[in-house]
Image (cartoon, grey):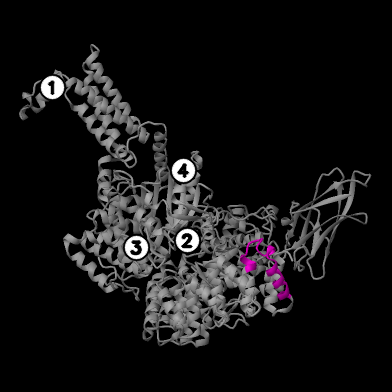
């Protein structure tokens, strides 16, 4: 007997990525030879390489997870659903370092290699993870001719009202990061966007092999083996970034994670993180990242914002703020500008231009993912909240943070 | 409690929370602008003040007053600048402040303190401010009027390809006041298609420092990609070449070479294979990535 | 005009021209982007120069020809100094009109988050204090100048006022003054008839057909392009055989209201062409001003990022040879510092199937639908040539027949057709002595011939515009006149015939594009040529 395992309800290798939030899976018999009964019990387990990811399972959309799951599967070929998720605290390091196996009796009848892919602390990536990330970034940039230009063009002073100074700041940037991450994953699916935890020292980020070392002038230097040496934006090569702090330490004056989470359990208070630590992190440097119009020229920008998003995710988990219908989850006050109300679609993915929106909408619709259907090509502000599918499973967006669990 | 009442209660509580944060920011602003506090206290308070800057005109003027005041300690002024900068990220909320902010930056761009000058000019240059560009270009033409060193001026001018800096950059390449200025001049010229021959010449010149040659390689990849790919191949095959340049060339071939490029080039593959085992770390690294891409 | 002037010399020149009434029109000429004075100037220098010209115009008064540049700056300008200068210059136009209000509001939307203090008093100075003026302030003052003429934008202005904490207290004061002026006590009904579309001087549509014979494309047929895939193609190879829509742009343009928007609109043109089944019959091309830098991969990326479809009939192009001739042929509104663009205008061209320029849109607010409609007209003329229907030369067909048709129709309408009509005219013109002219039956064939000419020209006009109302009226009028002559008891129908013919003629002569008579369009074209 042979069974087929579908991860994220797909047989495609591009879909074989899970995070902490449960991914819908299916199992079905493709070759029924052997069993005599119409239903066969198949035991599903995960097998990890040393240091690799680990997975767990559950039968239904709710309920406890287990390390193994026995599923009655009809030999007729009808598929049976189940859910798989990464085991919190055990993310993958390489693609396919955990195998989901299906056994009937003791016999292996099907297997598929998956990756528990989550967003990690950039300071603790392995060299291989780091190298894959910079290679993907460099390819997306393609010495100024690649799709990265769209992401650069999405974050300018012209477009800024769509994303800053109002409640939509966090949802917009969440969508922005997700779009970029999916484009990176189209180049290398093993890549996820890491975060720069700016309230702690992160010396491994500011190295020639990774995001570069700034000289006294603020010109970032890369190793000769680092493809980011070809980075180019606005037609100009290189990155200007002058830290006002010793990069072996954390920038001073930033709110710590604990202080940020303590801003308040209601969204209007929490979103003041836009000033500090977000704005303060940006202005801990001179150079591109310190001005809104040029910030996205520096790829470090995306790691900075990934941390801001992680703080939001952590706050959401801490206070249960995933449901847009819950008042405390968002700031739906009167007078929110367009693009900042829950039902509003977000520029540029909505393609709306002119009037109170910018004149053009670079980049088109939100990138799709083989691992998750949400948020769809034209996300609304509300779609950004339930990123794990805690309220509604279909809202799951397919990313997680290494230190923010699911439920 | 009815749903509507719950929602109203939550909403009020949310507003209360936000107001508390705003009050805290205002309190911080009050400390930050108080000359009777210590420098340390004021600098720490500045970090909490960004959201208070655009609360009202008085708050903005208080912060700008600190920035402009040459009698204030430089550390406090720098912290004020950083707070204003952080606040400016909220473009919509900062709208009422921007005009005064830009005016203050232009004034501070001519400040006696070099760090304040440099930061203000940097902020303005990133806005493609004509005032800043004019001052930077004047300084390059006449060093007695320079507000920042030439390498810094070139770096800041590179934020706008339309700044008329190319002739000055070329002059500095041929007669550099220092190595860093030459490097920045070349980086700036990396946006100038007419400079492709210069970059080719530099890349071929083994007497040029590796950093300069690397910049030239990156520039050539953008301006004349086919030329760089051919030259990169030559460099990799050249057994007398510097490690850094070999590593850069291999990286260029791996990142930007066509999918089939390396696969059919036996001489290149053989050479890279050797490098993957025997060369320096960075060359080995680049060589292995090349071989991974081309299936060896 | 010497091009190697220093900036102070340039400023002095502008001041001198402004001081001499007979030389003021030269100021407008200096605003052309391709003027040699801007050659090898950086973008910031160009801004200072142009701003100073606008400020000079603000002192001496903006003419209709200069108005175009002022409105262009308000419509798509991104530089605070230029927008401020343009706002001030607009106030020197002889009279405000409601048509200006959308431009002012658009400029406010464009520049509000880039507001900064500007110095408009002396050349090349930058404000380091926040006292003084700014583009938003100048725009508010211009709104106040417009007064009740801006009433169409009142709701927008009030919405601006209602946004709490967004405008500084200084600007709020100016905005309140503007609001007061806009709400003003003047009678509204006279102003209600003004629409936002009635710009003075024929500026409603920036489209113009090419008058006279179209310039042959032979001088540039050998221009070699490389397309977004790196494939070489000459001008002749690509542009001959199909009408084309051509836009100019470059990837390093930092004004999102110009090149980025132009290419985004090109993508919408593709959609419109597809919807009309014309995607394979009308080509498009986006040609870069910056061929040295905009290599094929950049062209492709730029276009695709904006939704442009790329294939054999729709290409992004860079000229690898013959660039200078291309610029001369199109009379491109662009200038350079070395190879980099320092300033350019928005420009879209319609080429006929011979690759000749048939029409162009410049500067303000070109509409994708309009561009497609014009391209379709050129396609139709191409098809007429193919079907051996002798076409009128486009220039004649487009502009002269309506005029001629109007005159002929008016002639038919008013020419006395019978002794009774003669008597009627005699009673009207008795004092003038026309009673001396006898009724002459030989005039009747002349009348018939004039009537037929009138019908034919009105019919042609209806074909080219798609609007048949005038034709039906003139036809009915002709029938009525004929009936009055031939059918007993229908004698009074002649009066109706005259009325219908006159009404039909006038209706046909009105350019339904913009609701203005065709003769006004002729005046603008003549001015441009």
Same subunit under labels 3 and 2?
Answer: yes
Classified by dominant secondary structure, the portion drawn in magenta counts as: helix
Task: Give the mark nearest the N terminus, 1 or 2.
Answer: 2
Task: Report the Cα–Cα distance between label 3 and label 1.
Answer: 61 Å
Indicate the quadrant where residue C253 lies.
bottom left
Task: Give the mark nearest the N terminus, 3 or 1.
Answer: 3
Choose mark 3 or mark 4, whichever is in front.
Answer: 4
Indicate the quadrant where residue C257 lies.
bottom left
Task: Give the mark nearest the N terminus, 1 or 4.
Answer: 4
Give yes or no for residue C355 being in the magenta stretch.
Answer: no
Q: Are marks 1 and 4 in contact (CB under 8 Å)?
A: no
Instruction: Return the mark for residue C83.
Output: 3
Q: Which residue is mark 1?
A: C422
Residue in front for this viewpoint, B240 or B115? B240
Indicate the quadrant where residue C438 lies.
top left
Task: Give the mark nearest the N terminus, 3 or 4.
Answer: 3
Residue in front for this viewpoint, C313 or C279? C313
Q: Residues within 10 Å of mark 3 (few under 14, many from 20)?
A: many
């Amino acid at each position: 007997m042979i069974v087929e395992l579908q991860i994220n309800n797909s047989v495609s290798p591009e879909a074989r990525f899970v995070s902490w939030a449960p991914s819908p899976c299916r199992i079905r018999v493709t070759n029924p030879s052997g069993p005599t009964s119409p239903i066969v019990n198949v035991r599903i387990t995960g097998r990890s390489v040393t240091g690799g990811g680990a997975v767990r399972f559950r039968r239904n959309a709710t309920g406890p997870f287990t390390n193994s799951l026995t599923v009655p599967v009809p030999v007729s070929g009808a598929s049976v659903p189940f859910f798989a998720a990464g085991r919190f605290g055990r993310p993958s390091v390489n693609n396919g370092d955990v195998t989901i196996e299906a056994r009937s009796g003791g016999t292996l009848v099907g297997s598929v290699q998956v990756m528990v892919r989550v967003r990690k602390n950039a300071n603790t990536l392995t060299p291989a993870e780091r190298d894959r990330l910079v290679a993907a970034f460099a390819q997306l940039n393609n010495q100024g001719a690649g799709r990265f230009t769209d992401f650069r063009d999405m974050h300018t002073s012209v477009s800024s009202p769509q994303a800053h100074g109002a409640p939509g700041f966090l949802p917009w940037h969440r969508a922005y990061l997700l779009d970029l991450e999916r484009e990176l994953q189209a180049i290398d699916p093993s890549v996820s966007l890491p975060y720069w935890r700016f309230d702690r020292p992160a010396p491994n980020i500011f190295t020639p092999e990774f995001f570069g070392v700034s000289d006294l002038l603020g010109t970032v230097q890369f190793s000769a083996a680092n493809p980011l040496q070809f980075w180019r934006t606005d037609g100009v090569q290189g990155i200007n970034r002058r830290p006002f702090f010793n990069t072996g330490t954390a920038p001073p004056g930033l709110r710590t994670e604990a202080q940020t989470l303590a801003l308040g359990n209601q969204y209007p208070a929490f979103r003041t993180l836009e000033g500090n630590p977000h704005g303060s992190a940006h202005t801990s440097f001179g150079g591109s990242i310190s001005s809104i119009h040029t910030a996205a020229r520096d790829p470090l920008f995306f790691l900075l914002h990934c941390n801001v998003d992680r703080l939001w995710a952590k706050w959401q988990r801490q206070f249960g703020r995933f449901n847009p219908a819950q008042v405390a989850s968002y700031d739906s006050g009167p007078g929110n500008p367009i693009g900042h109300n829950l039902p509003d679609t977000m520029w540029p993915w909505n393609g709306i231009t002119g009037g109170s929106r910018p004149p053009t909408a670079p980049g088109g619709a939100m990138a799709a993912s083989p691992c998750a259907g949400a948020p769809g090509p034209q996300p609304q502000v509300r779609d950004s909240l339930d990123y794990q599918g805690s309220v509604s499973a279909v809202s799951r967006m397919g990313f997680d943070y290494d230190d923010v669990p699911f439920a | 409690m009815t749903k509507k009442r719950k929602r109203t209660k939550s909403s009020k509580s949310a507003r209360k929370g936000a107001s508390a944060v705003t009050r805290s920011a205002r309190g911080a602003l009050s400390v930050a602008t108080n000359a009777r506090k210590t420098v340390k206290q004021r600098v720490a308070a500045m970090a909490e003040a960004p959201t208070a800057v655009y609360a009202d005109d008085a708050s903005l003027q208080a912060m700008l007053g600190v920035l402009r005041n040459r009698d204030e300690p430089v550390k406090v002024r720098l912290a004020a600048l950083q707070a204003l900068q952080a606040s400016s990220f909220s473009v919509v909320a900062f709208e009422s402040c921007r005009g005064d902010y830009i005016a203050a930056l232009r004034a501070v761009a001519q400040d006696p303190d070099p760090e304040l000058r440099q930061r203000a000019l940097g902020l303005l240059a990133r806005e493609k401010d004509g005032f800043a560009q004019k001052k930077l270009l004047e300084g390059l033409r006449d060093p007695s009027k320079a507000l920042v060193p030439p390498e810094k001026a070139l770096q800041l001018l590179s934020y706008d390809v339309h700044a008329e800096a190319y002739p000055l950059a070329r002059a500095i390449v041929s007669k550099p006041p220092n190595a860093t200025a030459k490097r920045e001049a070349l980086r700036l010229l990396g946006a100038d298609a007419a400079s492709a021959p210069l970059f080719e010449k530099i890349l071929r010149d083994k007497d040029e420092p590796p950093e300069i040659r690397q910049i030239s390689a990156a520039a050539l990849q953008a301006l004349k990609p086919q030329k760089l790919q051919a030259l990169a191949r030559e460099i990799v095959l050249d057994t007398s070449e510097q490690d850094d340049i070999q590593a850069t060339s291999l990286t260029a071939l791996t990142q930007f070479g066509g999918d089939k490029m390396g696969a059919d080039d036996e001489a290149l593959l053989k050479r890279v294979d050797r490098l993957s085992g025997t060369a320096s770390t960075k060359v080995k690294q680049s060589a292995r990535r090349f071989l991974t891409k081309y299936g060896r | 005009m010497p091009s190697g002037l220093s900036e102070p010399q340039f400023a002095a020149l502008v001041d001198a021209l402004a001081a001499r009434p007979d030389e003021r029109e030269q100021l407008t000429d200096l605003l052309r982007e391709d003027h040699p004075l801007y050659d090898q100037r950086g973008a910031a220098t160009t801004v200072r120069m142009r701003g100073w010209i606008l400020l000079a115009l603000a002192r001496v008064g903006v003419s209709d020809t200069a108005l175009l540049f002022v409105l262009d700056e308000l419509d798509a300008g991104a530089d605070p100094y230029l927008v401020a200068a343009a706002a001030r210059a607009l106030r020197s136009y002889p009279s405000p009109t409601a048509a200006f209000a959308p431009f002012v509001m658009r400029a406010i939307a464009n520049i509000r988050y880039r507001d900064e203090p500007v110095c408009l008093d002396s050349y090349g100075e930058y404000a380091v204090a926040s006292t003084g003026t700014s583009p938003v302030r100048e725009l508010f003052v211009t709104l106040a100048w417009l007064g009740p003429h801006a009433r169409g934008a009142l709701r927008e202005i009030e919405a601006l006022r209602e946004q709490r904490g967004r405008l500084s207290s200084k600007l709020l004061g100016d905005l309140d003054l503007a609001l007061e002026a806009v709400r003003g006590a003047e009678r509204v009904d006279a102003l209600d008839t003004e629409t936002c579309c009635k710009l003075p001087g024929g500026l409603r549509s920036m489209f113009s057909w090419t008058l006279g014979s179209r310039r042959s494309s032979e001088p540039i047929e050998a221009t070699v392009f490389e397309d977004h895939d790196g494939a070489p193609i000459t001008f002749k190879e690509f542009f001959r055989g199909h009408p084309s829509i051509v836009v100019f742009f470059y990837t390093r343009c930092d004004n999102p209201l110009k090149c980025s928007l132009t290419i985004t609109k090109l993508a919408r043109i593709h959609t419109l062409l597809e919807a009309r089944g014309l995607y394979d019959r009308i080509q498009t091309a986006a040609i870069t001003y910056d061929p040295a830098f905009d290599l094929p991969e950049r062209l492709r990326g730029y276009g695709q990022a904006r939704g442009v479809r790329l294939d054999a009939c729709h290409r992004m192009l860079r000229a690898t040879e013959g660039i200078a001739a291309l610029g001369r042929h199109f009379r491109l509104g662009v200038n350079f510092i070395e190879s980099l663009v320092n300033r350019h205008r928005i420009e879209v061209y319609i080429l006929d199937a011979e690759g000749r320029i048939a029409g162009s849109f410049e500067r303000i607010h070109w509409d994708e639908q309009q561009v497609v409609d014009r391209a379709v007209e050129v396609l139709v003329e191409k098809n007429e040539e193919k079907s051996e229907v002798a076409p009128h030369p486009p220039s004649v067909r487009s502009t002269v027949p309506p005029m001629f048709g109007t005159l002929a129709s008016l002639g038919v309408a008013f020419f006395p057709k019978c002794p009774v009509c003669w008597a009627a005219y005699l009673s009207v013109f008795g004092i003038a002595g026309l009673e001396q002219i006898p009724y002459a039956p030989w005039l009747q064939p002349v009348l018939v011939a004039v009537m037929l000419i009138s019908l034919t020209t009105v019919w042609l006009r209806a074909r080219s515009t798609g609007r048949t109302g005038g034709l039906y009226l003139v036809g009915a009028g002709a029938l009525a006149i004929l009936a009055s002559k031939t059918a007993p008891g229908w004698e009074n129908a002649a009066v109706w015939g005259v009325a219908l013919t006159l009404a039909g003629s006038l209706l046909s002569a009105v350019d339904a594009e913009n609701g203005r008579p065709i003769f006004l369009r002729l005046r603008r074209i003549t001015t441009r040529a």
